[in-house]
Amino acid sequence: MPDLLIELFSEEIPARMQARAREDLKRLITDGLVEAGLTYASAGAFSTPRRLALTVEGLSPASPTTREERKGPRTDAPEAALEGFLRSTGLTRDQLEARDDKKGQVWFATITKPGRPAAEIVAEVLDGAIRNFPWPKSMRWGSGSLRWVRPLHSILCILTDEAGASVVPLDVDGIVSGNTTRGHRFMAPDSFAVTGFDDYAGKLRRAKVMLDADERASEIRSQAENLAFARGWQIVPDEGLLAEVAGLVEWPVPLMGVIEDRFLALPPEVLQTSMKEHQKFFSALNPATGRIEGFVTIANIETPDDGATILAGNQRVLAARLSDAAFFWENDLREAKSGMTAWAEGLAAVTFHNKLGSQADRVARVAALAREIAPLVGADPDHAERAARLAKLDLRSAMVGEFPELQGTMGRYYALEAGEPEAVADAARDHYSPLGPSDAVPTAPVSVAVALADKIDTLTGFWAIDEKPTGSKDPFALRRAALGVIRLVLENSIKSRMIFILITRVGRHLGMLLTSPVAAQRAAVDAVLTDIDSQYRNHVLEEFKDLHNGVLGEDMIAFTQKAADRAFDLLSFLHDRLKVYLRDQGIRHDIIDAVLAQDGNDDLVRVVARATALNDMLATEDGRNLTQGLKRAGNILTQAEGKDGVEYSFGADPKFAETEAERALFAALDHADPAIRAAMEAEDYPAAMTAIAGLRAPIDAFFETVQVNTDNQIVRRNRLNLLSRIREAGRQIADFTRIEG
């Protein structure tokens, strides 16, 4: 069986596109071959800055001949129907066969498709892949119409079997396929022929090209660490930079340099960011001093002077870059020492959102909310408010203007220079976190308060103006903010009723949008929202009505309804994000739904604790069987209540019990009910699960021996009310009807 080798040789492919491109090439080619009837044993894709390559081993030499029977119209059908059938099959009338069918005689066509050689199929599939390749960005060049990420120079496409290698004939806009490629642009630029993948990979290595991106990355890491070790230094890990640099060179040659002493006073983050963003250097840390004192640059060529000229040029460019950074740093420090008032005033001129005001407006909101949240997380309210007022000021600094990724990090340095407490400075750095599912979560109380306030203000603000994520679109990163709130709350075990915070903040955002009369409306809104302390929608509405009936009348009631609606919608959004978060931790969505259906679902810590305990119980045989019993009780009750038009929710009396199974169930419920209630009140959810699991045996025995819908109506009502006790026992923990299976 032949092996296939493809190489698409071009000008330099951007490093960020290479990994996706090689996977796309593999997918397009292998899917196309399989759809055409070929099979293969394995496939591997590779990339360098100037080439995409694919090897397919064990390819079938040809597609098989296929026979397909297709049923047509009846033999007495109109001529037009028969003509249409013939056109669809490509046959003539004399090639059809009449067969008996249950409704009479019917025409059948047997369509034979002869197999095709692999070379013909490969050429067709590769042509389509090249012309329709899904580059994020592509270009045309010369006078042709072909689009590629950069000008495409050559196509290597060969099939190799026992008889040798043969070129698959292909012509894509004048680029004719062949069996030749080129090595390194400078060290081995001449073309050479190959006969298969092993020959191809071996000759490329001799031509100073490492084909495998993972091998290049491993070589870069190993050589850079060796250079650093020789000086007693350590390379600062950066997997993203490593992957990028591996996509910039075909033959990595690491060179180590030293940072001039005059720049060593710069913060290490500034040194690292400047070298990474501007020159793709790896930072080298001196463990003895704790400073970044050197760098490793990766050249793409071996030189007679062992890279001395390259390194000298890089040193000069680095000195210029770091001189700029030092200038920014010194100017920013002077502003920090003077209190950063100019930066604070500058935030008023920066629009956060045209409906949500300036960055200064946002800072004021976050500061007020951070003060409210501080007691919940054990933070000093004054420190929380002060940290929130300082956290965004570095956005106006020259350093963050040059390196936006340093926002927050530089804020900490400037806060310390201004004489702020360390907890306040740390919060300025940490309040953006967590930025994603793998980012660390702040644990210092002041940092947690400001981080929560920042994210809650963002969410409630955009919900107030009805700017929510739709489909895959999330321009304001609200899903990330929601996940940040969830992780901050859960990983710091913050037990609080989230809906109170959400309603008040949505209400205040809506109050900012009120127009007539502005002052009176806003004052009234603030007064109402400050006094709300309720969990449920109707209670919230009543609170508004009682406080302001006759002051703003129906306008305030409508306003309250709007605030509550949007806050509860935001809570639902947080629940959806929570489901995704817990699903990744092995808790099923239906278990989460069962817990969220209960009261108190805005306390996320309690929700997760209950869901975890329920998940553990359902992993046991007793838990699974108990769930079936609870669901069966609920189903019987629902049917009976629908039929009788009454609710069976009280009055079960053991004196009407006729069987030992009924009496045993009464006794079990009398024991389990108070135990479940006490455990739930103590938030000892495993104990609650243990208590309800004790009902499994008496419930099973009841359903095995007792007929609920008996002819004796007194006994029937008593048994239905007994089932309601089972249902209510389950409802103390979760809505078991939502659990699947």
Image (cartoon, grey):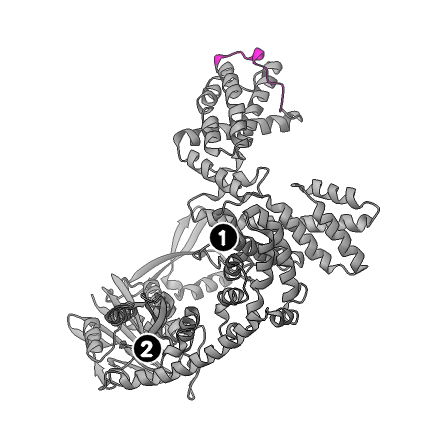
User: Which stretch appears magenta?
Assistant: 649-660
User: The residue under label 2 is which amino acid type?
Assistant: Val
Q: Quadrant of residue 710?
A: top right
Question: Is residue 356 left or right of 28 when viewed as pictured?
Answer: right
Majority SS type along the magenta span: loop
Question: Is residue 681 left or right of 314 when viewed as pictured?
Answer: right
User: The residue under label 1 is which amino acid type?
Assistant: Ala
- Residue occupying the point 66% across, 49% down: 503
- Residue occupying the point 77% across, 47% down: 557
Q: Which residue is mark 2?
A: 258
- Residue occupying the point 59% across, 68% down: 339
Distance of label 2 from label 1 (alpha carbons): 36 Å
In front: 638, or 109? 638
Q: Is residue 358 visible?
A: no
Q: If the image is split into quadrants, where does the N terminus sit?
A: bottom left
Question: Compared with residue 367, is residue 376 higher up or lower down, i.e. above or below?
Answer: above
Q: If the image is split into quadrants, where does the C terminus sit?
A: top left
Local packing at callout 1 (Cα closer than 10 Å; few below 14, some 14-19, many 20+) is some
Mark on residue 444? 1
Q: Position of residue 142 (x, y in %)?
A: 42, 88
Q: Position of residue 274 (x, y in %)?
A: 42, 75
Question: Compared with residue 346, is residue 515 higher up or lower down, i.e. above or below?
Answer: above
Question: Compared with residue 733, is residue 456 higher up or lower down, i.e. above or below?
Answer: below
In front: 252, or 678? 678
